[in-house]
Amino acid sequence: MAEAPIYDGGMVSRLRRLAPALAAVVVLSPLLRAPHSDTYPLSTYPMFTANRGSIHDFVTVVGIDDTGVVVRLSPKLIAGTDEVVLASVTVERAVARGRAEGLCEAVAARTASPITEVVVRSETVDLVAHIVDGAPALAVVEHARCSVTP
Amino acid sequence: MQRDAMIKRLAALRILMFAYAAIWSAVRAPHLLDTTDLDPIRFDPVGPLWFLTAPLPDGLVLLLVLLTPAAAALAAVGWHYRASAPVAAFAFLMITTYRNSWGQLFHTENLASLQLIVLAIATVAGSQWSMDARRGSTRSQTSGDDGSWAVNSMAVLAVGTYFLAGVAKFRISGWDWVSGDTLLHQVLFDNVRKELLGDPSSPLAAWFVGQTWLMAPAAVASMILELGAPVALLHRRAGQLWALAAVGFHIGVLALMYIMFPYHLLALGVAPLLPVENLAPRLARTAVGRAWVRRSAAC
């Protein structure tokens, strides 16, 4: 058997008018914050907004295999996550806070043969040249290097 | 739109959006559980969890990870909807907020979180195509509530989200954004970062660099889509066209940047603007649908 109505007619009528207006106020409320003052779920959506330029520094963690070749490590090995953006932030913050050695050791502990060494480093990259021609980094600065225990 | 069609649209949105929440939270469960192994120094709570001073206990994270898909699945099928929907919406908001509380804000589940809250409040969403309806225990069926306020509110949330993204581009980069330079560098930056951090990048990125004529039109088109979003609320047909354009926009983002917004790609965010109430009759005409109807009738 059907139960009693939750709303009377007047309330439904008010809901029809007010609910979409309230939704608009809520979703547009981030306009009151600075554009980079982001949060969740009421975001200012600052991603993809600023011009990053064509030359950029990336802080990365790479492996060196037993033949000396640089091997790109996965976000899972680098930061224990499959989210590449989270891995990137993890490495940037570790270097900024002077914790590159600790990060290096943590990544090395997750890494196995044929990787023999792990290096935390900054790479200055020409974005266009890298994407079009696979050009190597313009400059590389090493922050930490550690051995992988077999 | 007639009352019956509106209630059916809301019911279809309930099924689609809560099913998405159930599947997303089940598929992402391993990643969500990864947070229990992250260094607590990385914890940076945001939004509804701003007050936390330390990561949640592992057991509570596990409970939320298990609860979310279960409650969302129950809400999708409309089983004790007045209880299952608020639990599912709350749990989804909590796990996505927690996921965003480790130093990096993602922007893929914001709209889903907000629309699920509206669905949870709209109890009439459980009055059609639901387990509750089969049991005859849906009190909203007898009220004057056709759920239009909920459908319209979810449409406003979708439109507002895109509008905000467009406004952010103007607030941060001004008119420079429409030159296409910013877009090009964003596409390249994201792909290079993926390559350097061992993630697959888009094979179309190199092609995109060569299409210099395309940069400015692509930037202008995305700006029109975002800032012009409110037009979608003015007319039914405009809403449908804008919704399709929004899905096309996300296909472009996926192709050029390998960034997937699954909720948006599946047109779920813009679904309140689409005649999704027609999906169920179409599904019912398929072989699987006919079998389901026969089985339901036999029960």
Image (tube, grey):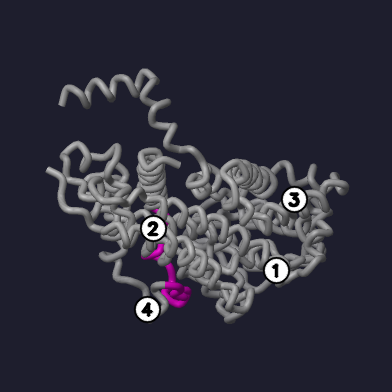
**Element type where label 4 sits in the image:** loop
| Host chain of mark 2 | B
Name the residue at the right extreme: B213
- Where on the picture, by quarter, is residue B94? bottom left
What label does residue B221 carry, if any?
Answer: 3
Specify the amino acid type for callout 4.
Leu
- Where on the picture, by quarter, is residue A144? bottom right
Camera-nearest residue between A14 and A60: A14
CA gap between label 4 and label 1 equals: 33 Å
Q: Mark 2 points at which residue?
A: B118
Image: magenta residue range: B30-47
Compared with residue B231, is residue A43 higher up or lower down, i.e. above or below?
A: below
Kindly identify the residue that appears in the image at 55 percent across and 78 percent down: A99
Compared with residue B58, is residue B218 higher up or lower down, i.e. above or below?
A: above
Kindly identify the residue that appears in the image at 24 percent across and 20 percent down: B294
The answer to which of marks 2 and 4 sits earlier in the sequence is 4
Neighbor class of circle 2 (other Cα within 10 Å; few <14, some 14-19, many 20+) is many
**Mark 3 vs mark 4: same chain?**
yes
The answer to which of marks 2 and 3 sits earlier in the sequence is 2
Camera-nearest residue between B139 and B60: B139
**Mark 2 vs mark 4: same chain?**
yes
**Mark count:** 4
Q: Name the residue under label 1.
A: A122
Q: Name the residue under label 4.
A: B52
Kindly identify the residue that appears in the image at 85 percent across and 45 percent down: B211
Neighbor class of circle 3 (other Cα within 10 Å; few <14, some 14-19, many 20+) is some
Pinpoint residue B99: horizontal percent, then vertical percent.
44, 63
Which label sits in the foreground, 4 or 1? 4
**Element type where label 3 sits in the image:** helix
Camera-nearest residue between A97 and B183: B183
CA gap between label 1 and label 3 equals: 35 Å
Specify the amino acid type for callout 3.
Ala
